[in-house]
Amino acid sequence: MSYQPVDIDSAPPQPRPYRVVDRMYQGWHQRGDGLYAADAGWRRDLEDQSYEALVESRGPVRPVDAATAGESAALEAALTGAGRKAAASLLVALYRLVLAEADEQRESGERRQGGAQYRIMAGREGSWESEAMVRLAWDIGAELAEKPKRYDEAAVAEIVRVVTGWVTGPDRYVEVAASLAGKFSEVADRAGGWAAVADRYLQRHQQVGRPDHVVESVQHYLMSQSRTHTFG
């Protein structure tokens, strides 16, 4: 049989990623008809457009991808090593991430235009996980950051390092909120549940620490992908 050259022009097109993040940290998702819709686009007057138009007008465009095995292992090691300080450490790490970005915007005198308020939200802005993540970072993480005995500094630094790579890497973007909740839930399940990854001030029905409804809001996010945790 003689060799038949392949017509490169006739090769099938590569599938487009379902979610992407543009250079302004605006998230986009496929509509199902070949066009991409912007997250919260109605609020920013962003019209649906093709992938090619996105690349041309708002590129570089990065696909939203999953964490690598190495990144997952690094997070698992950090959270496991933190023990009962794991929950507080994750909240402090999230606070440092949003605080650093808020400080950058304040110093420059400019709030990001045409994208998520914080880089860590861009992978799925508007999801309940993203909203809860940022709210808890400011409400609980900020308070915990002033209490170094309640968190593990090495774990905080490692979480910040991994997440920073997720959102600033040149070739991909990893959705933050659900990814962190998934890894935390996995570590907690393996350790024996919430009591093994949160100190006594983050337990329900205690005379010390936060009210039960606040503890439950933290649990609802961090344990949202747990196979064993029950709420209420």
Image (cartoon, helix red, strand yellow):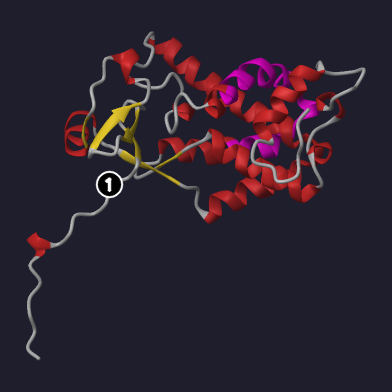
Residue drawn at 66 percent across, 26 percent down: 92
Above/below status of 121 relative to 84? above
Amino acid type, residue under disc 1 in the picture: Arg
- How many C-alpha atoms fall within 10 Å of the one at disc 1: few (<14), some, or many (≥20)? few
Q: Which residues are magenta?
A: 132-159
For the residue pair 116 and 10, the one nearer the viewer reads as: 10
Residue 43 locus on image (x, y percent): 34, 13
Residue 164 locus on image (x, y percent): 49, 36
Residue 154 locus on image (x, y percent): 69, 39
Q: Is residue 111 left or right of residue 51?
A: right
For the residue pair 46 and 25, the one nearer the viewer reads as: 46
Taking the magenta stretch, the answer to whether it contains residue 186 is no
The residue furthest top is 109
Taking the magenta stretch, the answer to whether it contains residue 134 is yes
The residue at which mark 1 appears reads as 16
Task: Tell me the quadrant of the picture where the N terminus can be found.
Answer: bottom left
